[in-house]
Image: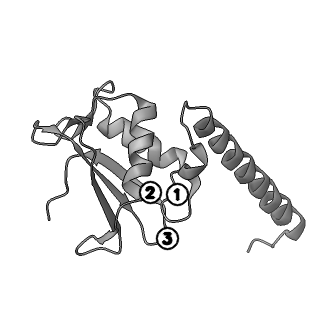
Amino acid sequence: MQTFNETEWLRLLFLLNDTQQWLEEMQKTLLRSLPCKTPEKLFKKNCYLSVAAFAHILERHYHKIPRHPGTGKFTISIPEILQLIRQAAEQLPLPQNGTTNILYQYNTGIELGYDKSGQPSTCITLIVDEKGNSKTAFPGLLHT
């Protein structure tokens, strides 16, 4: 039976806490470095956009990354994608059927890419979990 080493456990706990705080600050610094008018809106509590969530969005839905065929793809610049995510988060929230997620859909009035069927789209869909963390965003509407 292994004994509990409280000293080592506490050392690891504080190391992980310090590392997590450092990573969160680096994440904010990275997103603030983008040419956006109000980058602080990316850190709002109702739809917090983490680096992991934004990496997911770009990996799946940015036309310059040739992965995940059959998904909607943004054909606009990264700063424009961020701006539209912020604007989508200001829309009326809708429940996503069958989940605890919140759905934001926004018609931008400009062509921002194409939806999963390959049709040009002026709409963006943002999905946020019940805690306010952005999960994904893509061109087109989510049809349930």
Q: Position of residue 79 (x, y in %)?
A: 46, 33
Relative placement, left or right, of 22 versus 97 is: right
- Residue at point 74%, 46% (across, down): 22
Q: Amino acid at mark 3?
A: Lys
Image-quadrant location for residue 103:
bottom left
What residue is disc 1 on? Answer: 48
Neighbourhood count class around disc 3 (C-alpha, 10 Å): few under 14, some 14–19, many 20 upward: few
Relative placement, left or right, of 1 versus 39 is: right
Mark 2 falls on what kind of element? strand
- Residue at point 81%, 65% (across, down): 9
Point out the tag, 3 or 1, that comes first from the N-terminus: 1
Q: Are marks 3 and 1 in contact (CB under 8 Å)?
A: no
**Depth check, front residue: 130 or 15:** 130
Q: Amino acid at mark 1?
A: Tyr
Q: Are marks 1 and 2 in contact (CB under 8 Å)?
A: yes
Mark 3 falls on what kind of element? loop
Q: Is residue 131 above or below residue 35?
A: below
- Residue at point 40%, 50% (across, down): 87
Q: Position of residue 78 (x, y in %)?
A: 42, 31
Q: Is residue 18 above or below residue 58?
A: below
Q: Amino acid at mark 2?
A: Ser
**Depth check, front residue: 68 or 77:** 77
What residue is disc 3 on? Answer: 131
Q: Position of residue 120 (x, y in %)?
A: 14, 35
Q: Is residue 88 above or below residue 39?
A: below
What residue is disc 2 on? Answer: 134
- Residue at point 68%, 45% (across, down): 23
Neighbourhood count class around disc 2 (C-alpha, 10 Å): few under 14, some 14–19, many 20 upward: many
> How far apart are the alpha carbons under marks 1 and 2?
6 Å
Furthest residue toward front: 109
